[in-house]
Amino acid sequence: MRERRIVRLKGHVVGVGFRDRIVEVATENEVYGHVRRMGPDLEIDVEGRPGDVSYFLRQIIRLRPVGANVRESTIVPGKALGRSEFLREASLPETP
């Protein structure tokens, strides 16, 4: 059984190597999905076994790059899509 979480990180999270670190941590923890920049924020869409997803979410904050500062986060559950890799996707422009 898999679970999915869609996470939005706000703060100083862009331009500090955070997306690359997130891909690293995802690969090490066998979770799947993507990370992308959404304007000044980051979106992480992650799925995997429940314990793995929870651990991954704790690890990305604990192992964040020097200079990164998460001021706010939102986490929304979603339906697992059965993905088999974790990607760094193209950035989306800031929405009004």
Image (cartoon, helix red, strand yellow):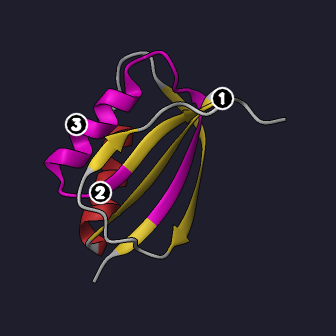
Tell me if 96 is positioned left or right of 14 in this view. right
Relative horizontal placement of residue 93, taking residue 77 as reference (left or right): right
- Residue receiving disc 2: 32
Q: At x 25% / y 72%, what residue is drawn?
A: 49
Foreground residue among 35 and 18: 35
Label located before the other in sequence (1 or 2)? 2
As displayed, is residue 94 above or below residue 48?
A: above
- Give amino acid for label 1: Gly
Residue type at mark 3: give it: Glu
Crowdedness near tag 3: few (<14), some (14–19) or many (≥20) residues, C-alpha within 10 Å: few
- For this rendering, which residue is in front, 79 or 64? 79
**Where does the image place residue 38, in percent across and percent down from the top left?**
61, 35
Q: Which residue lies furthest to the left in this view?
A: 28
x and y percentages locating residue 17 in the rendered image: 37, 20
Side of 52 relative to 73 (left or right): left
What type is the residue that disc 2 sits on?
Answer: Tyr
Q: Is residue 91 inside the magenta stretch?
A: no
Mark 3 or 2, nearer chain start: 3
Magenta region, residue range = 5-33
Total numbered badges shown on the rendered structure:
3
Q: In the orientation shown, which residue stands out farthest toward the front?
A: 90
Q: Distance between the residues labelled 3 and 2?
A: 11 Å
Compare marks 1 and 3 and give the one earlier in the sequence.
3
Q: Residue 51 carries which label?
A: none
Residue position for label 3: 24
CB within 8 Å, label 1 to label 2: no
Mark 3 or 2, closer to the camera: 2
Residue shown at the point (46%, 23%) measured from the top left: 68
> Of the numbered discs in the image, which one, if any, rests on residue 39?
1
Marks 3 & 2, CB-CB < 8 Å contact: no
